[in-house]
Image: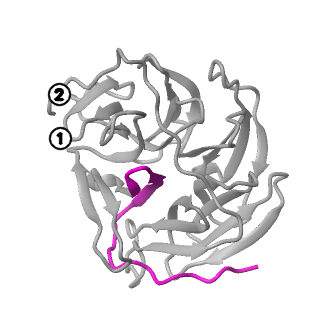
Amino acid sequence: MTDALLSPRPDRLELGEGVRWTDAGLVLVDILSGRLLGVPEPDDAPLRVLAELPCPLGAVAPVADRPGTWVAAAGTGICLLAPDGATTWLARPEGDGDAPAHMRMNDAAADPAGRFWAGSMAYDATEGAGSLYRADHDGGVERVLDGITVPNGPAFTADGRAMYLADSARGVIRRYPVDPATGRLGPPEVFATPEEGSPDGMAVDAEDGLWVALWGTGTVRRYRRDGGPDRVVRLSARRPAGLCLKDDVLHITTARVGLAAPGPDDGALFSVRVDVPGRPACAYRPDTSVQASGERE
């Protein structure tokens, strides 16, 4: 089954990713420009810059009970981003911020228990150079997986007991058991290996179906919770990258980066109505001791 697309918005992004439905509305990032963007209404209104960092910005999640504050996978680590744009770094595990970086953070999301998970990758997509990190409630950051090439997701079931993570360069989506009390991962199983394209951003709906953006194919596909393919959305853009569900509307970011001759809709934000709704993005829930320093980078 193919769902009918709504008209794309007028903005064009280089590497649109990390689209999330939050209490602050719909937000997304343009990774390589370091911009966090708000999606206003009506649909023909331009995207609004909420923050701009001097480093790549992979994805954000809202911080619970702190309006306007975000936790971000940015540069070589994870930081808190205050409403005035000040940054407080929880950790920079992929570099100290002074030496030239060959790694950067990529996609990220908070889980239902309030932890924040973020993947890293090499700029040149070196085989196995990436990792997955978890920021806990106390602000500590731990590497929980390594040997990944291009991590995308993670995406979590509503009960927080399963995590989907794509290794895009290897064309595989794995499902990991998660202990909600500790954040520890169990042994993974292969959930899906799409026949075409690279699995990129993902979103879980209210039936625990998994929507997956397939980079390079111009399609977004839904998989049932048993891993079986269900339906497809076809785009007039070649590189779908990020996904989120806002009620019964699936929002899809795309990219122009790396295309020798981008088409008119490459880099656009698309929306499509679907049958099964989704939920707002989960928030990062740090202890009260984890505060923004108010220092500006």
What residue is shown with label 2? 294
Displayed quadrant of residue 275 = bottom right
Disc on res. 239: none
Q: Determine if residue 157 is in view.
A: yes
Report the amino acid beneath label 2: Gly
In the image as oriented, which residue stretches furthest toward the left? 296
Q: Which x, y percent locates residue 265? A: 42, 81
Secondary structure mostly seen in the magenta stretch: loop
Q: Is residue 146 above or below residue 40?
A: above
Query: Looking at the figure, which quarter contains the N terminus?
Result: bottom right
Question: Circle 2 — which element?
Answer: loop
Residue 217 located left or right of residue 222: left
Q: Is residue 279 above or below residue 72?
A: below
Report the amino acid beneath label 1: Asp
Q: Residue drawn at (53%, 46%), measured in percent from left and top?
A: 150
Q: Residues within 10 Å of mark 1 (few under 14, many from 20)?
A: few
Q: Residue drawn at (73%, 41%), measured in percent from left and top?
A: 175
Question: Circle 1 — which element?
Answer: loop
Tag 2 near tag 1, CB within 8 Å: yes
Q: Determine if residue 218 is in view.
A: no
**Is residue 10 found inside the magenta-colored segment of the image?**
yes
Q: Which x, y percent locates residue 172? A: 69, 50
Q: Is residue 83 above or below residue 254?
A: above
Q: Which x, y percent locates residue 183? A: 62, 23
Disc on res. 84: 1
**Is residue 76 found inside the magenta-colored segment of the image?**
no
Q: Which x, y percent locates residue 218? A: 57, 75
Query: Looking at the figure, which quarter contains the C terminus?
Result: top left
The region drawn magenta spans 1-26
Residue 237 located left or right of residue 104: right
Going from the N terminus, do you reach mark 2 or mark 1 first? 1
